[in-house]
Each structure stands twice: as C-alpha cells, then as structure tokens.
Image (cartoon, grey):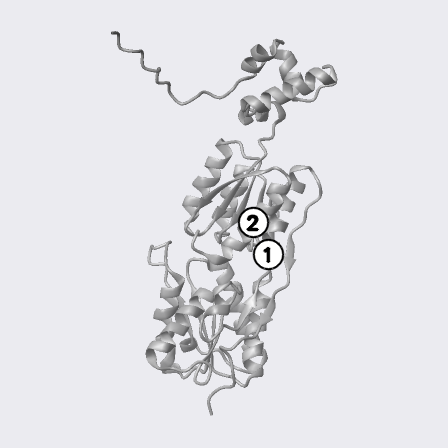
C-alpha cells in the first residue's frame, strides 16, 4: 500500500496581481486595469464584474506603483518625542482622525527628543516617498531648522515655531508664553509671591517660552525673580529622561528658598513634584501649591487633582493634519496659534500664613 502524497507546502501566498484577475475573468490585463480605475472605456457590467472579482480574490493595489504614476503615496510621516507621553497620544489621535477621513496612512516614529535621530527619521520618510511630515517634537534650533528646510519635505510642526518662514515649514501651536502667564497669574491671585519654576532641558524652545511667561508675569506684578526659585532638569545625554522622576528630584531643591508655590513645565513634572511633597510631608495645597501644564488625563486623577493649563491637544493634531493636506493641494497655509485655558483643581490654594 503506497504512502499518500503529502500536500505541498508553499511559502507565504503571493499577492493577487492584475494578471491573476485577468485570467480569472477571461479578459485582458488592460481591461482589468481600466475597470479597477473606473474607466468609462469599459462597459459598466464588465467593470462591475471585474471589481467584484478583484474584491473576492483579495486584490490589494500596489501603492508604490500607483505613487510612481500619480506622484502621491497618500502616506504621511509622523514624528513624536515619546510613546509614553500622554500629551502626544491625544495629538496623534487628532492627526489620525483627519488622516483616516482622507484615506491617508500614517508612518509613526519616535525621536526621544534627539534632533539627530529625528533628522534621520525624516530622511527615511523621504526615501519612502511620503507626501509630507508632521513633527510633534521639540527640536527647533537654528541648525536643525536649516537642515530640515534643505530636505525640502512639506512639513508641519506642532508646538514649534520655526525661525525660518520657508514655505515648506509651517507650524500650529498653543501659545506657551500666554499659557504660562495664566498659571502664574492664578498663583499671584491666590496671594503667592515666592513662586518657583521646574523646567526641562531637552525641550529647550517650549521651556524657554514658558519660562519667559513665568518671569514676565512675576516682573509685571513687582516680584523680582530669584534664581533660587528656578530648577531645570539637565539633559545628561539621556534623551529618554522621565519627567515624573525629574520633577520628583527637582522639587526638594526649591525648599531652601521658601517658595510657597511652584509652576511646572508640564503635568508629569508636576506629578513628580506632588510625589516629592508627599515623601517630605509637605501638604498640598496648604503648605505648597502646584500647577502643571498640558492637562493630560492623569491630572484629574492624582491626589490632590492638579491645577493645570489645558492645551487643545486633539485640535492641534487635527489642524496639523489639515494644514499638511492643504499644503499638498497647493492651497495657502499660514502658521496657526491656539489659545490655552486654565483649569483650577485642588492642588492650588492661598499661601500658608
């Protein structure tokens, strides 16, 4: 009795081609191609039959081949600083909603606040023929802007106002300077005068704008900024630094200056400051008021809930994607700045008597 033949093992199934559809339908290669492109040169009943057959066979158009013909790949490269940053998550959601509505695919990559890595990512995007790039990082130094402009890739920056007015480099942002003023004005209104600032060193431009808002608001109220009230997390060649850990480490350094309140670069720094207060037995807000920035989800759930500056994160993403689409269509596009709002919660109160 013979051994039955085993079924042949095949490698991964190859994609269905236009020629496969043509053979199954009994028509020419060109007929299938025209039918799939809804050409009026093909009779409606033939066009419908070919399209239904293509769908049944699982045909997927070759995006690369189409892009070579149409000069568009319908893909956009997206660079963010960190996948762990809750601010970035909401921005990406806004980008994705507009992209999906316009049948645009996103290629996501993470720079970890490393400008050289980001440029490598964007150059890779260029080689993959993306239509444009959205950058939600924080690397707008002069040399970086110059190199990014030289790449000549249509680009929209989020929360990064470039010094260059190059027509391919645009930005949408929420006003960091005005947002910082809202935070400090709130603390001043509660009676605080010794107000500290906890910042970051690896997002220099947004940190600079928020710090400027902090300084100008204090100066406008007749309060001289004391250098002992300011602490900024060093970069330490660690682009993957943890903001919560940094906030936790920075807060104790302010205590010798008798600050009664602290304005933090973002909510994660503020969460770290709250943790340090708890460890040191400092009651918030009775002994120390804490204000964050961004209004990420965790700000509502920490104890005490965090007073913060709300950034329109979802809207930033939506506008960035729409601006890039308009840019690709040759429409006039201009830099856009959105307003922030102060959200008062339980982490702020009058200074101790």
Work out which residue is located at the far left of the displayed protein and give it: 1
Q: Is residue 173 left or right of residue 122?
A: right
Between 63 and 136, which is closer to the camera in this rendering?
Answer: 63
Mark pair 2, 1: CA separation: 8 Å
Which residue was labeled with disc 2? 157
Q: In this rendering, does residue 168 appear at all?
A: no
Q: Is residue 66 left or right of residue 260?
A: right
Work out which residue is located at the far bottom of the displayed protein and give it: 353
Q: Are marks 2 and 1 in contact (CB under 8 Å)?
A: yes
Number of other residues with Cα within 10 Å of mark 1, as a class: few under 14, some 14 to 19, many 20 or more: many
Which residue is drawn at the image coordinates 33% and 55% (left, top)?
237
- Is 254 situated above or below 155? below
The image shows residue 120 at horizontal and vertical percentages of 43, 40
Which residue is drawn at the image coordinates 51% and 78% (left, top)?
346
Between 87 and 183, which is closer to the camera in this rendering?
Answer: 87
- Residue 153 placement: quadrant: top right
In the structure shown, which secondary structural element does the residue marked by tag 2 occupy?
strand
How many numbered discs, if any? 2
Which residue was labeled with disc 1? 173
The image shows residue 203 at horizontal and vertical percentages of 46, 58
- Residue 66 placement: quadrant: top right
- N-terminal label among 2 and 1: 2
In the structure shown, which secondary structural element does the residue marked by tag 1 occupy?
strand
- Is 61 situated above or below 274? above
- Name the quarter where the N terminus is drawn: top left
Work out which residue is located at the far top of the displayed protein and give it: 1
- Is 351 situated above or below 179? below
The image shows residue 298 at horizontal and vertical percentages of 47, 65
């Amino acid at each position: 009795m013979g051994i039955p033949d085993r079924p042949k093992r095949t490698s991964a199934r190859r994609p269905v081609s236009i020629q496969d559809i043509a053979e199954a339908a009994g028509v020419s290669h060109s007929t299938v191609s025209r039918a799939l492109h809804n050409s009026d040169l093909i009779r409606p009943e033939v066009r419908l039959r070919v399209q239904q057959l293509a769908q049944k066979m699982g045909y997927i158009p070759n995006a690369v081949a189409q892009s070579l013909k149409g000069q568009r790949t319908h893909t956009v490269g997206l660079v963010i600083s960190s996948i762990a940053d809750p601010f970035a998550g909401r921005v990406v959601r806004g980008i994705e909603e507009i992209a999906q509505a316009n049948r645009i695919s996103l290629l996501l990559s993470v720079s970890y606040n490393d400008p050289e890595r980001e440029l490598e990512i964007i150059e890779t995007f260029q080689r993959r023929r993306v239509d444009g790039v959205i950058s939600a990082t924080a690397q707008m130094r002069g040399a970086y802007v110059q190199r990014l402009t030289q790449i000549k890739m249509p680009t929209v920056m989020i929360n990064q106002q470039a010094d260059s007015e190059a027509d391919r480099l645009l930005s949408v942002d929420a006003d960091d300077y005005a947002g910082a003023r809202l935070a400090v004005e709130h603390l001043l209104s509660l009676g605080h005068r010794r107000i500290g600032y906890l910042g970051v060193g690896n997002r220099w431009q947004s940190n600079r704008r928020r710090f400027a808002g902090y300084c100008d608001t204090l100066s406008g109220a007749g309060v001289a900024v004391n250098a002992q009230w300011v602490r900024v997390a060093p970069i330490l060649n660690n682009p993957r630094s943890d903001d919560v850990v940094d906030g936790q480490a920075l807060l104790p350094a302010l205590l010798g200056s008798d600050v009664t309140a602290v304005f933090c670069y973002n909510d994660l720094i503020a969460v770290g400051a709250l943790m340090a207060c708890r460890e040191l037995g400092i009651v918030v807000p009775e002994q120390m008021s804490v204000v964050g920035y961004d209004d990420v989800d965790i700000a509502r759930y920490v104890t005490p809930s965090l007073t913060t500056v709300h950034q329109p994160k979802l809207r930033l993403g939506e506008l960035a994607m729409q601006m890039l689409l308009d840019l690709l269509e040759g429409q006039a596009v201009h830099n856009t700045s959105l307003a922030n709002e102060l959200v008062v919660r339980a982490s702020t109160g009058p200074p101790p008597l």
